[in-house]
Image (spheres, rainbow, N blue to C red):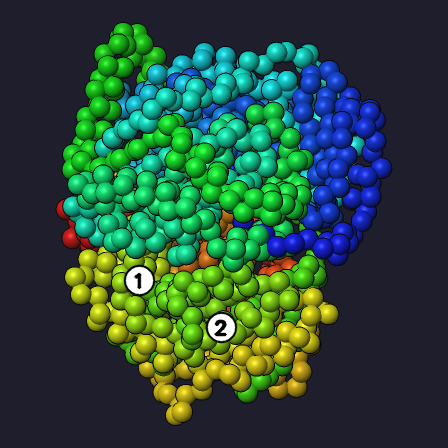
């Protein structure tokens, strides 16, 4: 996976004072073990360099180095069962052939100890991993996995070590994953030769995303002297210049322990990790000098400008306003951790939210739709940079944008920042440190990766409380501390790039022509013998991909390793003014998590399409005595954010029954709960809908975000569309979350008079923001529950109830209480949560085929089948079947043979079975592959071992760790109790081969169940001439 903005900057991005109470460990065993190590201790070929307690994050960091090779190692001990490993190599390519990215794919295709094809994908089904992946960033490649099972950890570690240090790097694997010349039909040498390859197609897809294209050019032009001047993921037209020999040379020089950084996290013993890593990998190497360091960028003497072109955005709100422009400034070396912390914080003050100076000056000037891509602080390169600008502007306004940026910099130097805004940011950091995520290890490895990559101190990076104190001290000593930084890095900094990017109507045609010219050049360079060899090699690859493999060399867990029962979560339900409230006491570390669901049942039909827009703006327009700016400030000061979104969920026992509503979510430190609930009260009772100009800004930003998201989420849009006519809720899903919503927001953003839409919002509010048909939930510590109950009670009593009972628009309402067999819940008398679900007795599922024409060089394909609800025993069979078909059939056909970046099958909670492909060079061929997959399953062409592996993969998802903030949410949101989950678990264990064949026969084989098809992608002669396809 390629992502040049990979590093999760969250930890240092967003905090208040730290009192001594933060020194309490949640549980001390992992930390106590780590604190026993002393500097100089030698353990299994490693020497301990430093042991550091970081109490604010409840962890102890042990920094080591490997004696023989010099490999760096950081262990973070924390009482967390979701243990993580990662190994990271500094990879610094000097061309855009994508060598580190293709290598990342190819090392995972087999190794000395595990010479099977694709052990990485095969381990997804032989493990209970909670995460497995690999990432190529601009200057490093990272291989992380996480699991809660100790044996699984050792298995995965063995596979990852062998892949990284002893890969096979076979020529055919390079062909499959990187690029190759192959006949369109590999079996027919008369068909033309064409470019194929997984990474080749992945990057063709990546370069249809204009935001990515802009960000890539920005980095290439701002840091032009070394590795940052190239595309680490590979530029599609340069990828065919990479040879197999160059790939192997790059591995030899970059994937060596002397150029490696190992990271482990969690509560498993460090000694076990060190012993295995030393014995299985590092003991077999000697130290070398790795010449992979990135030199500092030479600072410029004067600013530079650059202009690039890109493809048209078919969903842009104004075709004449599609230019992006930004001004970017080179900052300090990221290994200076305090300076980086300060500049990161300064960046948030400059561009974060409606109170920031650049938001006021640029976004509210009405010149564009949203900030330019990569806005703010970027610390993923050796020297960080800051970028600010606009997208959706007309080309003649480029100079105006530059002038506004320069003027705003001057104003900030003069006026500084309000103290309250600084406090709000420091409060955000405090929340981030206290909020417990289930993927904290992954967040840490990504957070430290860039700094550590350039010899920075990763442990110093974790001492966030220390940075906050240091920052407060500097600010106290010099109130103009931040203004001086703005002057130093922005005003007086000649290393400044103005980048603009405009669309060209014929951009994709020119790209196609250049690809065809490249192809012609490659084909013409082949001798007749080489052409024959190319054909034979294509057949050899096809045969290899089609072979049944013996995978017994790979380690695997057994189904018997899976826990037979789940722990039940204690829930209490109380009632205030007829509103049920679910209380779930959890170790939330001083945080309170609030949710509420209100019903859409009474909302008139004509207002429904505007519900997502209402959700988007309701917390951003101001409320009560607060303007929208004051509201934003109060939200930042007192909460970790308020969010509102549509909530459509299928019933657990019928596909034709569903709940429709809004979900309100927020979190805060326990001391701020009364303030957070007061904010919600004001939003419910006195929201503002008067500011037309601000509403326009929010509409344009929403429309732009939706349009920008299509290249990354095309498969999701295809599946939503394909399932539109399969259940009564499908239409609503398409209206709220599908391409219909993208198109509606485009139309609204294009309106010259937006008042008619604005006037709909108070009408929607009248139906949705009241306590009729509402329920709430709270997750907090047991000690905090009495206070939480008071605050929630006050909120419920304070919000409006309708004066007269409104009739539901769709009259068929079914009242459904929470599962009466929920023995794990402490259900008090009549205080069950009753949800009002709806159905349409006249609904008939029907087939629909839609092709959304988009100017992309790749397709996103979806085929959806109506199957069964969650509580049906067949649901378990279909869930395992989806995993089985993905691993044993679809992955081979769609990715390995077809060259798509991704593809597979999945079963959603709503009983819709989806086949999908992602960044796929094929379309109709993929649809026929979906049908062949069903036939393959029907024929039972899989073994008991295959079934067991599919069960392991399904249980890995079922048993993924749940954060304290999310416990009890299945019950609250979907009406699925622990008892129901346990029954589903037993269904999963019981699934056998006959059940799977039966399920494929009953639901998936063509003609058995109603299905829908959809694709997003370029023009297609097959859909164009077939009248059953709707072309949009």
Which numbered mark, 1 or 2, is in the foreground of this view?
1
State whether residue 302 is above or below residue 6.
above
Q: Residues within 10 Å of mark 1 (few under 14, many from 20)?
A: some
Q: Is residue 20 visible?
A: yes
Q: Residue at x 62, y 86 (%)?
A: 830
Q: What x and y, as percent, mark residue 606?
A: 26, 74
Q: Is residue 939 visible?
A: no
Q: Residue at x 44, y 65 (%)?
A: 630
The number of discs equals 2
Q: Is residue 616 above or below residue 151?
A: below
194 or 277, which is in the foreground? 277
| Left or right, residue 730 beside residue 146 | left
Dividing the picture into quarters, in which one does residue 921 lie?
A: top left
Residue at left 45%, top 34%?
Answer: 488
Query: What residue is shown at x 81% (from left), y 47% (from top)?
Result: 29
From this viewpoint, which residue is outermost toward the bottom? 804
Say which element carries label 1.
helix
Q: Nearer the viewer, residue 865 or 24?
A: 24
The answer to whether residue 881 is above or below residue 152 is below
- Residue 882 position within the rendered picture, expressed as x and y whole percent measured from the top left: 48, 50
Q: Which residue is mark 2?
A: 680
Q: Secondary structure at mark 2?
A: helix
Q: Nearer the viewer, residue 269 or 440?
A: 440
Report the side of 169 relative to 189 (left or right).
right
Corner quadrant of residue 728:
bottom left
Image vertical order of residue 204 relative to residue 904, above or below: above
- Which residue is labeled 1 in the image? 694
Measure the alpha-carbon separation of dots 1 and 2: 21 Å
Which x, y percent locates residue 100? 47, 23
- x%, y% of residue 181? 32, 20
């Amino acid at each position: 996976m390629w992502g040049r903005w990979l590093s999760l900057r969250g930890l240092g991005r967003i905090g208040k004072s730290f009192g001594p109470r933060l020194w309490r460990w949640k549980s001390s065993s992992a930390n106590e073990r780590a604190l026993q190590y002393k500097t100089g201790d030698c353990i299994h070929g490693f020497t301990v360099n430093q042991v550091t307690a970081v109490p604010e994050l409840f962890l102890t960091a042990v920094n080591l180095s490997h004696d023989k090779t010099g490999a760096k190692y950081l262990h973070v001990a924390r009482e967390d069962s979701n243990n993580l490993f990662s190994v990271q190599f500094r990879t610094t390519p000097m061309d855009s052939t994508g060598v580190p990215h293709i290598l990342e794919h190819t090392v995972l295709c087999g190794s000395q100890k595990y010479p099977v094809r694709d052990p990485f994908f095969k381990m997804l089904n032989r493990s209970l991993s909670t995460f497995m992946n690999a990432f190529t960033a601009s200057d490093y490649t990272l291989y992380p996995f996480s699991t809660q099972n100790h044996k699984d950890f050792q298995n995965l570690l063995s596979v990852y070590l062998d892949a990284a240090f002893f890969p096979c790097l076979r020529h055919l694997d390079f062909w499959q994953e990187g690029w190759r010349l192959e006949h369109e039909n590999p079996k027919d040498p008369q068909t033309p030769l064409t470019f194929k390859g997984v990474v080749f197609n992945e990057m063709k897809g990546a370069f249809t995303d204009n935001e990515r294209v802009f960000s890539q050019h920005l980095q290439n032009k701002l840091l032009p002297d070394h590795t940052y001047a190239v595309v680490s993921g590979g530029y599609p037209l340069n990828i065919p210049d990479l040879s197999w020999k160059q790939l192997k040379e790059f591995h030899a020089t970059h994937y060596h322990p002397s150029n490696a950084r190992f990271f482990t996290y969690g509560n498993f013993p460090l000694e076990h990790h060190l012993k295995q890593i030393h014995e299985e990998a590092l003991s077999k190497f000697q130290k070398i000098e790795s010449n992979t360091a990135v030199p500092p960028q030479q600072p410029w003497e004067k600013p530079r400008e650059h202009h690039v072109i890109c493809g048209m955005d078919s969903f842009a709100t104004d075709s004449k306003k599609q230019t992006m422009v930004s001004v970017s400034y080179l900052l300090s070396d990221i290994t200076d951790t305090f300076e980086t912390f300060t500049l990161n914080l300064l960046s948030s003050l400059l561009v974060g939210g409606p109170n920031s100076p650049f938001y006021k000056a640029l976004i509210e000037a009405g010149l564009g739709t949203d900030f330019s891509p990569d806005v703010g602080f970027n610390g993923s390169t050796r020297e960080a940079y800051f970028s600010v600008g606009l997208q959706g502007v007309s080309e003649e306004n480029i100079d105006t944008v530059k002038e506004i940026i320069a003027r705003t910099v001057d104003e900030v130097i003069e006026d500084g920042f309000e103290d309250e805004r600084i406090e709000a940011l420091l409060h955000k950091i405090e929340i981030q440190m206290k909020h417990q995520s289930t993927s904290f290890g992954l967040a840490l490895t990504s957070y430290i990766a860039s700094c550590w990559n350039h010899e920075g101190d990763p442990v110093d990076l974790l001492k966030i409380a220390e940075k906050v104190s240091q920052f407060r001290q500097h600010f106290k000593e010099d109130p103009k501390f931040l203004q001086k930084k703005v002057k130093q890095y922005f005003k007086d900094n000649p290393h400044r790039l103005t980048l603009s990017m405009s669309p060209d109507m014929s951009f994709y045609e020119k790209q196609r022509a250049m690809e065809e010219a490249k192809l012609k050049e490659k084909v013409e360079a082949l001798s007749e013998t080489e052409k024959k060899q190319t054909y034979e090699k294509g057949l050899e690859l096809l045969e290899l991909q089609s072979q049944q493999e013996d995978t017994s060399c790979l380690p695997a867990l057994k189904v018997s390793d899976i826990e037979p029962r789940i722990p039940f979560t204690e829930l209490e339900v109380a009632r205030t003014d007829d509103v049920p409230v679910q209380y779930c006491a959890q170790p939330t570390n001083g945080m309170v998590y609030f949710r509420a669901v209100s019903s859409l049942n009474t909302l008139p039909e004509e207002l429904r399409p505007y519900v997502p827009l209402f959700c988007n703006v309701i917390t951003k327009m101001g409320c009560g005595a607060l303007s929208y700016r004051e509201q934003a400030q109060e939200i930042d000061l007192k909460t970790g954010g308020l969010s509102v979104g549509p909530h459509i969920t299928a019933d657990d026992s019928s596909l034709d029954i569903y709940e429709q509503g809004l979900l309100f979510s927020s979190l805060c430190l326990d001391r701020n709960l009364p303030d957070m609930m007061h904010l919600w009260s004001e939003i419910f009772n006195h929201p503002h809908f008067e500011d037309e100009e601000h509403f326009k800004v929010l509409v344009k930003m929403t429309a732009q975000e939706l349009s920008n998201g299509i290249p990354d989420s095309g498969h999701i849009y295809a599946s939503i569309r394909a399932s539109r006519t399969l259940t009564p809720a499908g239409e609503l899903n398409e209206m709220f979350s599908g391409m219909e919503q993208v198109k509606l927001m485009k139309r609204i953003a294009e309106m010259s008079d937006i008042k008619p839409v604005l006037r709909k919002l108070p009408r929607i509010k009248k139906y949705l923001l009241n306590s009729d048909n509402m329920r709430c939930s709270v997750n907090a510590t047991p000690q905090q529950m009495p206070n939480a109950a008071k605050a929630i009670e006050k909120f419920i009593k304070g919000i409006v109830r309708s004066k007269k009972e409104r009739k539901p628009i769709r009259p068929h309402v079914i009242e459904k209480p929470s599962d009466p067999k929920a023995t794990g819940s402490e259900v008090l008398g009549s205080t069950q949560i009753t949800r009002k679900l709806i159905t349409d007795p006249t609904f008939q599922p029907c087939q629909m085929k839609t092709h959304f024409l988009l100017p992309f060089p790749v397709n996103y394909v979806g085929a959806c089948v109506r199957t069964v609800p969650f509580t049906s025993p067949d649901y378990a069979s279909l869930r395992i079947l989806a995993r089985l078909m993905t691993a044993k059939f679809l992955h081979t056909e769609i990715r390995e043979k077809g060259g798509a970046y991704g593809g597979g099958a999945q079963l959603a909670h709503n009983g819709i079975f989806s086949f999908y492909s992602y960044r796929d060079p094929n379309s109709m061929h993929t649809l026929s592959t979906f049908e062949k997959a069903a036939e393959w399953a029907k024929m039972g062409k899989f073994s008991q071992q295959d079934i067991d592996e599919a069960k392991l993969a399904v249980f890995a998802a079922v048993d993924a760790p749940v954060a304290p903030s999310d416990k009890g949410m299945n019950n609250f949101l979907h009406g699925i109790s622990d008892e129901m989950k346990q029954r589903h678990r037993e269904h999963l264990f019981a699934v056998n081969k006959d059940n799977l064949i039966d399920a494929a026969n009953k639901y998936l084989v063509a003609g058995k169940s109603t299905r829908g098809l959809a694709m997003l992608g370029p023009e297609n002669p097959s859909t164009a001439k077939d009248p059953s396809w709707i072309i949009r």
